[in-house]
Image (cartoon, grey):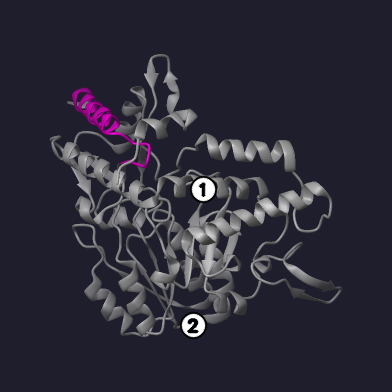
Amino acid sequence: MTINVSEIRAQFPILQREVRPGVPLVYLDSTATAQKPLAVIAAMDDFYRRSNANIHRGVHTLAEESTALYEDARAKIAGFLHAASPRQVIYTRNTTESINLVAYSWARATLKAGDLVILTEMEHHSNLVPWQILQAERGIRLEFVPVTENGLLDLEVYRQLLAQSPKLVAFTHMSNVLGTINPAAEMIRLAHQAGAVTLLDGAQSVPHFAVDVQALDVDFLAFSAHKMVGPTGIGVLYGKRELLEAMPPFLGGGDMIREVHLRSFKPNALPYKFEAGTPAIAEAVGFGAAVDYLTGIGMEAIAAHEHAITEYALERLEEIPGVKVFGPEASHKGGVAAFTLDCAHPHDVAQILDQDGVAVRAGHHCAQPLHEKFNIPATTRASFYLYSTKDEVDKLVDGIYKVKQYFG
């Protein structure tokens, strides 16, 4: 299954840009945020031009249109995930807020001192810090599944940790640094056997390959629109209905209530119990358009294209003396290539690449403990998506040779 990359690139206005005269943009930073197609831009523009109004409470035409668009997008997202009901799809600001919602609502209502939460050494800070805060506040215990030298999780240690009766297992579906695609279905199955609830960080998986929440049997899934060609400022927490029903509200205010008195309130039904205040309505419309766009191309086709680009990128990078690529081989990896160059700091590499229009990320990528694990301060990260090409990989490689020449 193949995709027409030239046709796809023509639908992304920013990819036609020159970052300076005569220097076209080579965008290799999609793991940080994806670019947006005309379909998403147009959907949000049309909303503001034609239907802009607050949702749920109004009875006039614009309010009804706005509400319908907002809820239609939720239904599209539920379908995209194969969720049983749109009521299991909670709008948040991003993956980080989705994980924090679980930590502040489910975990604070459920966990007590000494309870074990299992994480991994490859987690983004968004799936570390909320649990560290809870550890300081409640005295819960955190243990970590180690990462092996080749960038995979040590599942034997994971099984040993599960024998200690954890209450929660929270892990990334795909590492934003190593690109490692973790065996989520197997890890969730084992966690459930041990009696644990599971939370999956899908920020890097949901945009790039098909994710079926019912097939995975995951309890919570968090992800963001902006990494899947949608707008910034909106994300989703998916949860099993029985868990969401039992959880207390996360924020208090308008729309999350059924009724309010001076000394008491009753929370609204799902999903509105967790959606306080005026939400990101236009962003939800854009989110729905992004789901339509990705569905129209096909997630299997997108995953196959990214795999081919990643495989080619790893081959090219390994040709360069002094380059070390982190993470597993392409068969266990998504569209990420994080590397170091022995003669230059990652920030210098990124800055020199930018002179030729090549946009990559440098730093610890909000995964500082993982970099400490490999005893490095930072990496340079190139990342790929449905609009990436082998020609862009070649420009990346040419740029790295320029860095070597500059520092050589």
**121 left or right of 196 in image:** left
Q: Nearer the viewer, mark 1 or mark 2?
A: 1
The quadrant of the image that shows the C terminus is top left
The circle drawn on residue 378 is none
Quarter assignment of residue 324: top left
Residue 386 can be seen in this image: yes
Q: Is residue 153 above or below residue 115?
A: above
Q: Are marks 1 and 2 in contact (CB under 8 Å)?
A: no
Residue 208 can be seen in this image: no
* Residue occupied by mark 2: 113
The circle drawn on residue 292 is 1
First along the sequence among labels 1 and 2: 2
Q: Is residue 8 above or below residue 376?
A: above
Query: Is 336 in the magenta?
Result: no
Sort mark 1 into few (<14), some (14-19) or many (20+) by Cα contacts within 10 Å.
Answer: some
Q: Which residues are magenta?
A: 381-406
Q: Residue furthest top?
A: 21
Q: Is residue 196 above or below residue 204?
A: below
Place of residue 113 in the rendered image (x, y in percent of width and height, measured from the top left): 49, 82
In the rendered structure, which amino acid carries the disc numbered 2? Ala
